[in-house]
Image (cartoon, helix red, strand yellow):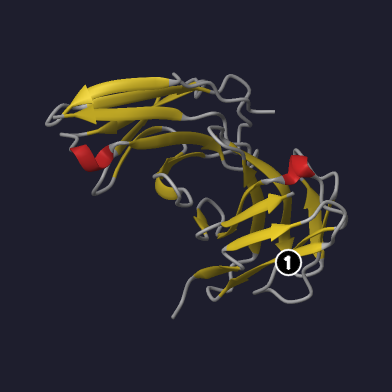
Amino acid sequence: DAGITQSPRYKITETGRQVTLMCHQTWSHSYMFWYRQDLGHGLRLIYYSAAADITDKGEVPDGYVVSRSKTENFPLTLESATRSQTSVYFCASGTDYEQYFGPGTRLTVT
Amino acid sequence: LAKTTQPISMDSYEGQEVNITCSHNNIATNDYITWYQQFPSQGPRFIIQGYKTKVTNEVASLFIPADRKSSTLSLPRVSLSDTAVYYCLAYNDMRFGAGTRLTVKP
């Protein structure tokens, strides 16, 4: 089915471990985004990508790495997880003026 | 940066029209205003976008005055299921603010 998916949906990891969150879209949208949403707060942009092999930092990129070798995939890696990175992570893909969000990944760092 | 400002919360009753205003004083001349709705434990969902004047779709209307320093999302005849957080976003800026928590009461 067409759409945007994220995996895993839930993840618990320990401080210092590397974690990769996956995002896959089937619309062939050129833009893709990663946001984090902390409890009771709005969304903050981590990284975005305008096309394959083009990525750029958002508001809160420190501690995160992204890549985009294929248009449909945009993985987000936490190189060494910290407790402050406990959050819900949303991936989105978009056209010129609309973003379509995935279901989110709830990440807990212990 | 097109920093957006919205009321933190609003209450309404079923059947009423709700207007949520967003200020965006520094919006770029070529940027669009977009609005999203978010329910608990879900990702935001696109509602409507516009550049100026008025845009209407099946769920909402968007009013943007000539100076484009603000915009108003209008939800006609809200129901309990419209209880959610609503965000305005200058699209090229890609920064969501804190949003407006709308509570619709019976």
Foreground pick, A67 / B71? A67
Residue B39 is situated, as x and y percent measured from the top left of the image, at 39, 45
Q: Secondary structure at mark 1?
A: loop
Residue B53 is situated, as x and y percent measured from the top left of the image, at 37, 31
Foreground pick, A59 / B70? A59
User: In the visual, does B100 lie left or right of A31?
Assistant: left
Q: Quadrant of the C terminus of chain B?
A: top left
Please, is residue B61 above or below residue B59 in the view? Answer: above
User: In the visual, does B99 lie left or right of B101?
Assistant: right
Residue drawn at (70%, 67%), measured in percent from left and top?
A74
Q: What residue occupies the far bottom of the structure in this picture?
A: A1
User: In the visual, does B38 lie left or right of B32?
Assistant: left
Residue drawn at (47%, 35%), measured in percent from left and top?
B87
Foreground pick, A12 / A79? A12
Q: Which residue is mark 1?
A: A75
Residue B57 is situated, as x and y percent measured from the top left of the image, at 28, 47
Q: Chain of mark 1?
A: A
Tell how many labels.
1
Answer few, some or many: residues within 10 Å of disc 1's Cα (few below 14, many 20 plus, some between 14 and 19): some
Quarter of the image for residue B8 reads top left
Residue drawn at (61%, 68%), measured in percent from left and top?
A8
Residue drawn at (42%, 50%), measured in percent from left and top?
B45
Amino acid type of the residue tagged 1 in the rendering: Pro
Foreground pick, B30 / B61? B61
Q: Quadrant of the N terminus of chain B?
A: top right
Please, is residue A39 above or below residue B7 in the view? Answer: below
User: In the visual, does B68 lie left or right of B55?
Assistant: right
